[in-house]
Image (cartoon, grey):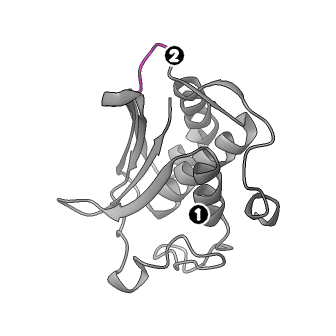
Amino acid sequence: LASLESQSSLSTRQSLDLAALLREEIDAIQSTAETKDLQICSEKIPDGEVLISGDPLMMRIAMRNLLKNAVDFSPNNSLIEVACKVLEGGRILVSIKDEGPGIPDYATNRIFDRFYSLKNQETGRKGSGIGLSFVREAVELHGGSVSLTNRESGPGAVARVELEN
């Protein structure tokens, strides 16, 4: 995280298939999701390529952090929806929706702060508070934006990452 925060631009940039990366990260976290009987729906990830220019490792870690948070904060027997689409103007939107407790009002302005972490209601433990900070730094270095909000209807949160194509 400290290394990312000191960068003003990406030192590594190559063509990267974001759709394939998301499918790979979903596969990697699938066994953890199965221990909680979670279903990860990836039907809204295109079969074809969704290309961006960026750092593959940095983007992989960022997407892994968002998926891991969704799994960690989701109650047993619930659904996580992952989508990736190209918007008008060529920007790309990745969204990850869970059915967890959502974000308390007091935390909405601090959720991406370094070392800020919420207690997991199921385990009673807190994370390091570095994951979402890393996500924000990585996405911003890629010229994008990230948000984490409560779902408009029903319980849960939605992480949205918007990137340049």
Would you say residue 20 sits in the magenta stretch?
Answer: no
Location of the N terminus by quadrant is bottom right
Q: Residue furthest top?
A: 48
Vertical side of 155 occupied by 46: above or below? above
Name the residue that disc number 2 marks: 49
Q: Give the dominant element type of the magenta stretch: helix, strand or loop.
A: loop
39 sits to left or right of 35: left
Kindly identify the residue that appears in the image at 52 percent across and 78 percent down: 118
Residue 44 picture quarter = top left
Kindly identify the residue that appears in the image at 56 percent across and 29 percent down: 18
* Rendered location of residue 47, percent (x, y): 45, 15
99 sits to left or right of 14: left
Quote the CA–CA distance across marks 2 and 1. 26 Å
* Rendered location of residue 98, percent (x, y): 37, 54
Please state which amino acid type lies under the numbered disc 2. Glu
Residue 75 visible? The answer is no
* Rendered location of residue 163, percent (x, y): 49, 40
